[in-house]
Amino acid sequence: MSLDPQLRALLGAVRRRIRQYIVVDSLLAIAALVLMAFWLGLAIDFLPVRLGGTEMPRSARTILLVGVGLAVMVLVVKLLANRLRKPLRDDSLAILVERHHPELAGRLVTAVQLTQPNRTSDSHEPALLQKVHDDAVAVVDQIEPRRIFRFQPLWRKAWVVGPLGIALIAFAVVSPSAFGRAAGRLLLLSDSPWPRQAALAMVGVELPSVTADENESGVAELVEFVDLTMRLPQGSSGALRVLASAEGAVVPDVCTVYYVTDDGNRGQANMRRVGRVVDGQQAFILDGPPLAGLSESVRISVRGLDSRLDDYYIEAVPPPAITSMKVVTSDPAYLQPRGDDTQTAQGSPARQTDYQSGLRIREGSQVQLVGESTVPLGAVDVRLVRGNEVAEQVVAEIEQDASGFRIRIDDMRKPATIVVVPRDKTGITAQLPYRYFLGVVIDDEPEIAMRLRGIGTAITPIAKLPVAGKVTDDYEIDMAKLELGIVAPAPADDATVEPKESGIAKLEQAAPGTTTAEPIRADRDGNFEMLLDLRELAEQARLVLPEIEGNQAGGAINLIGEVSDRYDLQGSHQVKSELFRLEIVTADRLLALLERRELALRARLEQAIDETRGLRDSLDLLRREADQPVNATATIAQTEPAAIEDVRREQILRLRAQQNGLQASKTSDELSGIAASLDDLLEEMQNNRVDSVDRRERIGSGVRDPLRAIVAGDLAKLIRQIGDAESNAAEPIAVAEKTGQAVQTAEDVLLQLTAVLEKMLDLESFNEILDMFRELIESQDGLLDETKKEQKRKTLELFD
């Protein structure tokens, strides 16, 4: 028996509807997944942009696209392919129908199962089977296949797919460009960014330039990012610049820089607006952290409204630094050793030393600065400032291995400041110029100082001139000599004094035979002593001395020293000493001049004797005051305590003893000066060859030696006694005793000085006799001259 066609049609309709249900359910699930993934990806990709973030990176979009594709494949396999592949048997469909139609009471299942072919295990009555079959066919028209399906799952998926689908259609209709951009970014993985309200553009970092030229140093130079990367020197302080477009975009009120250092330190800083909109661009600048005093690499992002500049990396690299500087110098030619004058400074031995503050170079030397750097160098900017001159650029030579450099300075004559800024091969410069100051040891002119010993302003034609002095130079004396020149006597009516400059000019322009020169031979320290004998020079015909007749002037001798060194950079160093002008006189005239000086010394001795008398009287007064009772010398009220009176008296005694001691020391110095002046007189007479034994004994043994004996003997004893009285001022009795001894010593000094004065008076009387004799001789010479002139006149009258 076969199944009734109506029942078979019912089961076929149910089977068809089940398959349709599977397809619709799978498609709705897949559509819901795709639409949800689209809107979720769009939100993740677009919403951060509106909040100031960035688009979803391509990697994330790729993961999302691959994930959605895999999920769709899973849904197709599980919800569609696997379910459609499962067979729907008639008995299973009959059971499904009877589950939702209880009124069938198992007839449909029984009819389906018992009518299946190849079913032999069941035993039944055919009539009964027919009855069941007919009953099932009878209620077929009452069966509704839709009742066996639950449409809630479909409706739930439809409520998801419907709004999302409608929104997608509306999005595509309202903003096709945005829909296309979203589809391109999510499906085609396009990198086209979402349009933004604000538009920021990275300019770069303005970094103050560091150069050796002070006029150019500090000028900002722009460093741009290359592939979002930039290299800046450590310690630099740059300013980050960003431009915001004002044409078709909104200018942000503020731009914020977010940064993270390589050490993980994070932070943010607001950029400040600079000026107004210019050429449709508004500038923003950041001149603080993290770029102020950059110490480590940093990664930055800039945000302004919904525009963002991301993943800019600033690498902090160590700037080049000069680790050492050596100074190599070569001396100029004038400092070369003797015998090497032809050797140039370039060929002279070089000296090398480490640079240090205050280093000074010899004038005219050639200098090389040899520096070493911490990194390979690409260039070195050098400026040289000599004194107050304008800075000049100097070319630095880079070593082959780029580890150092050389700076050459020829002819170092002025102090110089060398400003050096090293630059590595990538253009990174040192952040501060290196300054090296080199002083110059200026070659000073040589010096000559000399004096005449035992010679006054007047000399005889046969005098000896003892010259002592010293010649010095900072390096080496090349020439030193003494020059003597004869100056002709001036006319009798010319009373003007010849200035020093005129005397030097005459000496330099004198005719042959009137000048001579003697080389100076100094010792290691430059000291020299020479004796110029006028008589020997005249005998050798090296100097022609004028003849002196009677009392007429005999002219003068100019004596001057000259010294020079080997300096040859700017002229030469020739220095002359003080000019000594010595008047040439006769021996008698010289003695007359010396006698006048003796008179002056006698006056000084008389004054010293008067002062010694005053000293004696003052000491005697001090002795009497020390002997008197306290109340007799007190100058204060009688009501004062005795202790105060003792202190006052001690102070008075000490003060007066000090005054007497000062007077005694003054007298000692004066007498020593008189003795020294007498020594000069004797030495001057000896050098002028007018000395005699009697005169030397009278001045030396009669006056000079006694004065020195007095100074070294009783006068020194007097000074000690006064000092003892001063030290015992607290004991009036001791003061009186010491002062009494000092008074006696002062009396002895007075007696001795008086004896010396009488000796000088005897010398004066002797000199007066000599003056009278000289006047007689001069009168006789004058009378003879007048007689000769008268005779000559009368002889001439005979021929008239």
Image (cartoon, rainbow, N blue to C red):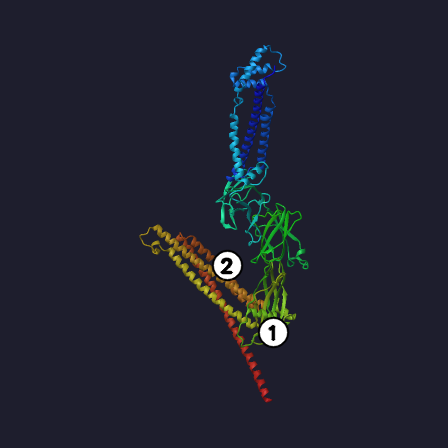
Q: Position of residue 781 (x, y in %)?
A: 56, 79
Q: Position of residue 401 (x, y in %)?
A: 66, 47
Q: Position of residue 352 (x, y in %)?
A: 63, 51
Q: Position of residue 196 (x, y in %)?
A: 52, 42
> Against 18, is 342 above or below?
below
Mark 1 is surrounded, within 10 Å at the Cα level, by few (under 14), some (14 to 19) or many (20 or more) other residues, namely some
Residue at 38% from the left image edge and 57% from the top image edge: 624
Q: Amino acid at mark 2?
A: Ala
Dots 1, 2 in contact, CB < 8 A = no
Q: Is residue 625 left or right of residue 552?
A: left
Q: Nearer the viewer, residue 314 or 536?
A: 314
Quick one: label 1 or label 2, which is nearer the N terminus? 1
Q: Nearer the viewer, residue 19 or 461?
A: 19
Circle 1 sits in a helix, a strand or a loop, which is it?
A: loop
Circle 2 sits in a helix, a strand or a loop, which is it?
A: helix
Q: Which residue is mark 1?
A: 546
Q: Is residue 307 left or right of residue 616?
A: right
Question: Quick one: quadrant of the N terminus?
Answer: top right
User: Quick check: can you spot residue 196?
Assistant: yes
> Against 533, is 362 above or below?
above
To which quarter of the image does residue 588 belong?
bottom right
Q: Nearer the viewer, residue 136 or 559?
A: 136
Mark number displayed over residue 712:
2
Q: Amino acid at mark 1?
A: Pro
Mark number displayed over residue 103:
none
Question: Quick one: quadrant of the C terminus?
Answer: bottom right
**Circle nearer the viewer, 1 or 2:** 1
Mark pair 1, 2: CA separation: 46 Å
